[in-house]
Image: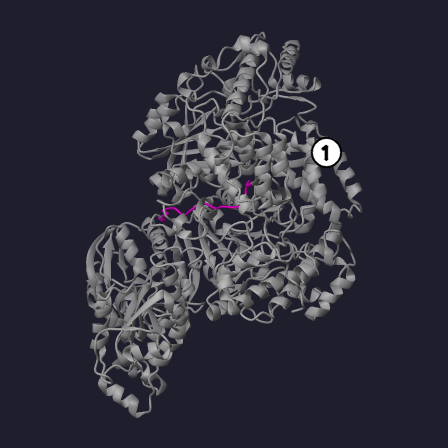
Amino acid sequence: MAENDFIHPYIPNSVPEVRDEMLSAVGLESVYDVYSEIPERLRFKGTLDIPEAIPSEYALKRHVEQILGKNKNCKEYLNFLGAGCWQHYVPAVVDEIVNRSEFLTAYCGANYSDIGKYQARFEFNSLMAELLDIDAVSNPIYDWGDAAGRAIRMASRITGRNEVLVPKFTCPDRLGEIRQLCQLEEMSNAISVILVEHDPKTGLLNINDLENKLSGNTAAVYFETPSYLGLIEDQGEEITRIAHKSGALSIGGVDPISLGILCPPGSYGADLIVGDLQSLGVHMSAGGGQSGFIAFRDEEIYIAECPLEIYSIVDTVEEGEYAFAEVRSDRTSYGSRDKGKDWVGTASGLWTIASAVYLSLMGPKGMKEIGEVIIKNSKYTQNLLSSLPGASIKFSQPHFKEFLVDFSGTGKTVAQINAILLEKKIFGGKDISGEYPELGGSALFCVTEVHTKEDLNRLYLALKEIV
Amino acid sequence: MKNIKLKKYHAPKYDEPLIMEMGVKGQRGIMIPQVDKEIENTVGTLEDLIPAKAQRKKAPALPEIDQYHTLMHYLRLSQMTLGMETGIDIGEGTCTMKYSPKVNEELVRSPQMTDVHPLQPEKTLQGILEIAYDLRNYLKAISGMDEFSLQTGGGAHATYINACVTRKYFQDRGELGTRNEVITTQFTHPCNAATPSTAGFKVIILPHKNGYPDLDGLKSIVSERTAAIHMTNPEDTGLYNPLVAEFTKVVHDAGGLCFYDQANANGIMGVARAREAGFDACHFNLHKTFSSPHGCEGPAAGAYGCTEALAAYLPVPVVTRLSDAYHLDFDRPKSIGKVRSFFGNLPAVLRAYAWIRSMGPKGIKTAAEISILNNQYLEHLLSQIDGISYPYAEGKPRFEQIRYSMEKLKEETGFGSHEIQNRIVDFGIQSYWLSHHPYVVPEPFTPEPCETYSKEDIEYWATAIEQACKEARETPEVIESAPHNQAIHQIKDFSQAEDADRWAITWRAYKKKYKK
Amino acid sequence: MKTKIGLIVNPVAGMGGRVGLKGSDGKKIHKMALTLGAIPVSPERTCEALNVLSGIQNKIELFTYPGEMGQDEAILCGLSPIVIGSIRKGKTTPEDTKKAARDLEKAGVDLLVFTGGDGTARNVYDAVSERLTVIGIPGGVKIHSGVYAANPVKAARLVMDFVASPGKIALQTAEVMDIDEELVRHDKVSAKLYGYMKVPYERGLNQSSKAGSNPRDEVFQDEIASDVIHNMEPDIIYLVSAGTTTKAVMDKLKVESTLLGIDALKNKQLISANLNELEILELFAREPETPFKIIITAIGRQGFIFGRGNQQLSPSVIRRVGKENVILIATINKILSLNEEPFLVDTGDPELDKELEGYIRVTTGFGKQHIYKVSA
């Protein structure tokens, strides 16, 4: 079986003369001499059932653009969806940097040839540390839910215990990932996920229920601020204190864009902090911009139990010069791993660079201002929507950017409402009624700095017509 | 070797400070939309809106720096990163560092990708769902599997899906209590030991026999406790295991499932498939074989494929097609649930789709063939270098990559693959990757000259290695103190990053430990 | 600051090998070897190593003993040794080796290098116990002790790695074996575990003093110990054999263990210590209903799992416990150090050895096992 004569711009040696010259140099008639290692019956005969190549780059681009044109996007439509992926403005300089070929295509180049990447990552670690008020940050993993699950497993290994307490209204995606990582009950090292009730008035974690459910087997208490339902969890310090009293660790889940105005969990002693970087300078990309970070105290036990890569600044032989090297905690005396470490893999590294640039541009004032405009825009919208007949904002606790609107009193389901909003080119809030039926016919709205007063008024007026 | 002239390369060097040390108090990098006056007047102050205990008391110590200088700083850092497009990246084997076409970058930067929210109503996502669904079809064709999930955040993540699917499959059958062992091989990626372990299984690693996974070893340990095997073929050594179908048969006969980690698919696309080899599931790395860029270790995507028998267990949602509309199917009662939020890393899915459409079936096959040929050519050149060899299966061909050893060079000169790695970057090529842990092959390095690289690239790369080996013998001080032409000098003492009193993962930790 | 290296050459080691005699300690054998025309092998082997080391002589201070115990070799290879102690030329004995080791320890050497065989290793151990880091240059016949490098050049490379990063290079604990050379000469090998000394890693997970030291065995041993303890069942008696990896299990349970012997555990408590074969058989007799398990690890350079260092686990003992109740534990470093050679068994009963051949599960981590070959 001879090779095809198929020249392609992505394959320089596909030119038959070059290919033949190389075959001759290595003494082969054909690469199929190599493929003869594969037994005949395992060989795939025939042609792959894939469409023929689109012959020109122009035609390819046109073809794909035509398909993508069947999407609608959040520039064309007014968007109020959030729930883990949020619409924030991505500064031009951030896009400029993350689209740089070098950052886009770098991989595991060792300490010297990609020093720029390592420095950018160290800067990310450092800026996040300031935002979170904690001293160590690892390389990121897939998303917030995965980071939370990893942190919980770390806590289990550190404390030797097998239970975690999680707020009842945790984002279902995240809770699903946490449950996945905590293993099925049959497995010998499964971690029990116990849900903690909410306070019926504030919507926050119910401290009484937390205290009742804590035991000598609790490895960690996990809480989120803002919570899935947008509430500002102001009991973080108390939760941490109570957890510590029981010998459990405190894991805070955060949306980092809130931390210009909200108190970071590091400030009140949380042991591990997780969250998603997508709100810090990363496009939504239909969920492709998620990036879960894990941060913790700069203590040997955390570094030893963290499964992800951690880098430190180190000296070179030249005075005053920095480099970066992997922290190999398995070389320390603290390498005890009672339950085997979790896997690490290529995940979401580029977004650390996006966030580093974002935080550098924003600075302390920018982070404060963006928190302020978000919370105020959101409050304004809450006021408007709560004035709609039959609608109410769930829970009395102050919100950050997201809030739950209960439409049960309107006689219309969220699905019905959202369908009409869609006709008006508005993406309404996420329909929660299937996830948490006890919350009524509710929708989770997300308001950020991208919304103008006119946008918010438009939403209000559209809903006014519907309900 | 032919007379290839090595370049007088020097990496850009800006002596660039850390951003934490830059800027001037009061400078602004970007202005934020202001609160509308009417909103300002009606909602109250920040203190009104945030409960006292949750208010941030101390502003974060972030840089205060103007926009131009922020841009300049990060541009300089990007220039001090070789990446894959300016440095011949043959050295990073198993990573398949192939060209990520720029036209695909333009496509993922379109607002129809960047400004799409994953929870939008399905009828507004028909474009991206069509892309995902078509990609699924192409991957089905390449693998022979019946269904695919594109939900993962990476390749290792896909192996985790398999561990979770295996778990659920046996739980369904009431066998999870007994079937608690997953088998993998010495040369398969270590995530195939780690992900089943995280999923709660015990892991058993088969030894190799002259470089091939040991079939007798497998036979000695399969039992009613076997849940699955996770294996790669060809493995990182570059050896194709011709007995792969016996492996799957042995595991099936014992009642276990067979998973094919296809991180090393680049050399066999269109030539051999998971199905014929008897696998129940497989995965591909979209950011390796299918050209999505590596992005400083992510974002990444793994595509997990399986037979009809396992499809019910796939994570939700699965992209399906109903009449002529695309649909996100959440109605899958046997699903393992979620491994990642939403339904996948769609930009990577889009790039993979575009790459496949650009290549077509002939192009894909040619890519596989040329990656094999490129590797034979590199092997031909490297074999001429004294001190370099590769172990196992003498006389057997290697597929798309080889794990070489510099053990002989080390014995003769005291310098091995770590030291040579520091030097070759001085010739303007990206550093090579050594091996997964543990280093079964001593003094390892694993290049993979995939189809992106030209004959000249391969010759240059081999010449750089040859030169460094020569220096190891003739001018050892050059190797001893390498690198010489980089932005920074040699790291002084790696143990600084192994000692809790001296490591500093963040700048604030550094200041606490070092500055008085 | 220069690294202080101590060098001891056992001038008679290995002499017997070339003329078909095994071992060469003992005056009678030494004379016999010389009569048969044996040429001392140690000096040549030492020089192979020292020639490589001469490249870093400005970074080291070499301390050694007079004449054929190190001075001659050092000078021959162009080094300038600091000579201490005294000997009777041509009439050196194991006592001289011990004295040399003690004197070099007093002189404050950072690393002690010696050329010889198992006997030499025992002598050094008698003198300095585990207090010094050592590297053995193989100079004798077949060596069983794990303190020796694979060959003189590799020994020299280890010394250089040590000098490049003293105190940071990772050390492993390797076995010193007590081979009864009289028996060896009559084709009967009976090796006992004699002690342990600290040596730098030769092969392992990653290797380069520049790129940082190797992951410590203690880390893996601790993980393995966790797995063993996690899987311990109540009311079963575990016979724990000698070895550093098995010791890690005892340490984790906070139980006193016998360095070179067999201890018995039940419900994670020590019920009997340092048992010999007879005592084990008596224990079986006292506990006829109780199930037993054996926990062993690989001993020595060749990776013996039965027959070297744990002969108390005789064929009767092994048969009574049952092959399926043997728990073998070892670190991945240990497995790699075998260079793809199998684990070995030599129980004394060839039939039992044949039964034990094949594949065996080795616990190498928490919830992690390797499959490896066992050979008789």
Where residue B189 appears, as percent x and y from the top left, is 52, 53
Q: Relative to the observer, which residue lies in front, A312 or B449?
A: A312
Of all chains, the one bearing label 1 is A
Residue A342 belongs to magenta span: yes
User: Which x, y percent locates residue B94?
Assistant: 58, 54
Please say if A79 is above or below A111.
above
Residue B123 falls in image quadrant: top right
C101, B337: nearer the viewer = C101
Identify whether C159 is placed above or below C234: below
* Left-right relation of B213 to C246: right
Residue C261 at x, y percent in the picture: 23, 64
- Going by the image, does C366 lie left or right of C90? right
Q: Is residue B300 magenta?
A: no
Indicate how the structure is coloured in the image. one colour
The residue where tag 1 is placed is A68
The quarter of the rendered structure image containing the N terminus of chain A is bottom right
Q: Residue B40's spot in the image, x, y percent?
A: 55, 11
Residue shown at the point (36%, 42%) measured from the top left: A301
Locate residue C162: give its quadrant.
Answer: bottom left
Name the residue: 68% across, 27% down: A73
Q: Is residue C219 left or right of residue C339?
A: left
Can see residue A82? yes
- Mark 1: which amino acid? Leu
SS for dot 1: helix
Q: Quadrant of residue B389?
A: bottom right
Of B491 and A105, which appears nearest the observer?
Answer: B491
Residue B335 appears in the rendering: no
Overall secondary structure of the magenta section? loop
The C terminus of chain A sits in image quarter: top right
Residue range in magenta is A335-349
Q: Judge by depth and name the residue closer to the eye, A228 or B515.
A: B515
